[in-house]
Image (cartoon, rainbow, N blue to C red):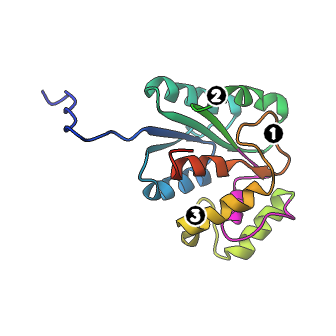
Amino acid sequence: MLNQRRRKRPGRTLKPIFSIVCEGKTERAYFCAIKGLCSNWHIEVECSNNKSDPISLLGKATDQIKKFPHGSFVAIVCDKDNWNEKQMKPLLEFQEKDRCFLIFSAPQFEYWLVLHKGVGARIQTSTECMDKMNKLFPNYKKPTIPKEILNIGSIQHAISEAKKDNVPEFLNELPEKGTNCYALLERILNPRK
């Protein structure tokens, strides 16, 4: 029958699944663009159907957890926007070591993009972040990702810079500034982490 799943070939192992639920189009564009750099995982990237509120993101991620077998991972990628701690609390509770991740950027996701080519030391607001983004990437327009950052060297630079903000992999509270996106990229690029 056509609908039957083909048996896997002997000696061939299936890649574990990493499902990434994104708040916005920029986040989705970034993770879709780097999928080709990540040969250790089957990566699925989804948006929450134009609903970026924390509860919609959590619902989509919960659906993904039920859909995929153990050994798979799910990450919610979001940024500060105008959400407060109370609205974000369900996402903080969603985290589960070695299965469910909350990837958070403040003041916004473009902060993570800036770190690929620069430093984020003086960025505190969304305006400062976009000013730095436009300085580093003069032709930048959301949600397009600058091609020059889509390589392992740039990602390693961003990981190194992000760690300077001391944002932990698993969040107990939301940072005012910084990102733990480095933890997701380390896990994707190095499956033994």
58 displayed left or right of 16: right
For residue 119, say whether it is visible. Answer: yes
Q: Amino acid at mark 3?
A: Ile
Q: Amino acid at mark 2?
A: Glu
Q: Which mark is residue 145?
A: 3
Rendering coords of residue 192 (x, y %): 52, 44
- Few, some or many residues within 10 Å of mark 3 (<14, 14–19, 20+): many
| Magenta part of the chain | 104-123
123 displayed left or right of 97: right
Residue drawn at x 79%, y 57% is: 164
For residue 150, say whether it is visible. Answer: no
Q: Earlier in the sequence, mark 2 or mark 1?
A: 2
Q: CA distance from mark 2 to mark 3?
A: 30 Å
For label 2, the residue is: 96
Vertically, is 178 above or below 94? below
For label 1, the residue is: 174
Q: Earlier in the sequence, mark 3 or mark 1?
A: 3
